[in-house]
Image (cartoon, rainbow, N blue to C red):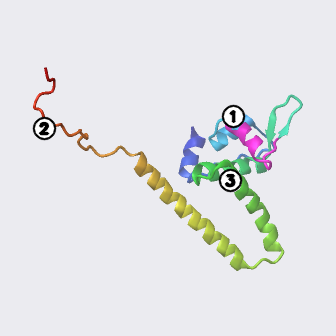
Amino acid sequence: MATQLSRKQSGGTPQIPDRLYFKIGDVARICELEPYVLRFWESQFPQLKPNKSGTGQRLYRRRDVELVLEIKRLVHGEGYTISGARQALDQERRQPQSQKSGVAPAAASSSNAVSAAVGRARAELREIAAMLAAPVSARPPRRRPRITSIASGDLFPS
């Protein structure tokens, strides 16, 4: 209970305890996810490979927990698809290496501008989707016009 309150007060970023290994239930509690989501993400993200004990139990390290939190931020927070989050993680992993090799800061700022524009576009698309999902305002139902004149004046001639 106290950890939940402190997590809410600290701005939403959970505190990772200082331990060497975490079981899947511990990671699920820290990241506020279900264990099946973690198992699915292991199959989708090649970077996420926890060790397994002799009994087959998953043992996550601190860097694995941080990676899960980053995936959760991308997928749940920013609205990335699984493949988009995978690409974003690959790009983040390559970016520090390219900066070390002497890539100009202008290239980094242009990629930040592009990601900011994509974020704005996503937000606008979410607003449009919300508008489309909202119920249509109450309007009178459409009625077919009645036939008012009949040439012979009688519907069923004898």
Majority secondary structure in the magenta region: helix
In this figure, which residue is indicated by the disc labeled 1?
Answer: 36
Work out whether residue 15 can be spotted.
Answer: no
Q: Position of residue 110 (x, y in %)?
A: 65, 74
Element on which disc 1 rests: helix
Question: Which residue type carries mark 2?
Answer: Ser
Q: In 3D space, how far apart are the residues under numbered discs 2 and 3 (Cα atoms)?
A: 65 Å
Position above or below: 51 against 112? above
Task: Give the number of the disc on residue 85.
Answer: 3
- Kindly report the distance in space between the C-alpha atoms of the residues bearing marks 3 and 1: 18 Å
Front in this rendered view, residue 14 or 101: 101
Q: Give the quarter of the figure containing the N terminus.
A: top right
Rendered residue at 42%/45% (across/down): 133
Name the residue type under label 1: Tyr
Q: Residue at x 75, y 79 (%)?
A: 104
Label 1 neighbourhood size at 10 Å, few (<14), some (14-19), many (20+)? few
Q: Amino acid at mark 3?
A: Ala
Residue 41 position, x and y percent, is 72, 42
Judge the density around disc 2: few (<14), some (14-19), many (≥20) Cα neighbours within 10 Å: few
Q: Nearer the viewer, mark 2 or mark 3?
A: 2
Secondary structure of the residue carrying tag 2 is loop
Distance from Cα at disc 1 to Cα at disc 2: 68 Å
Residue furthest right in the image: 54
Give 150 or 35, whichever is nearer the viewer. 150
158 horizontally vs 24: left or right: left
> Position of 26 compared to 150: left or right?
right
- Name which residue lies at 72% across and 38% down: 40
Earlier sequence position, callout 3 versus callout 1? 1
- The region drawn magenta spans 36-50
The verdict on residue 38 being magenta is yes
Q: What residue would you read off at disc 2?
A: 149
Placement of 112 over or under 81, stated as above or below = below
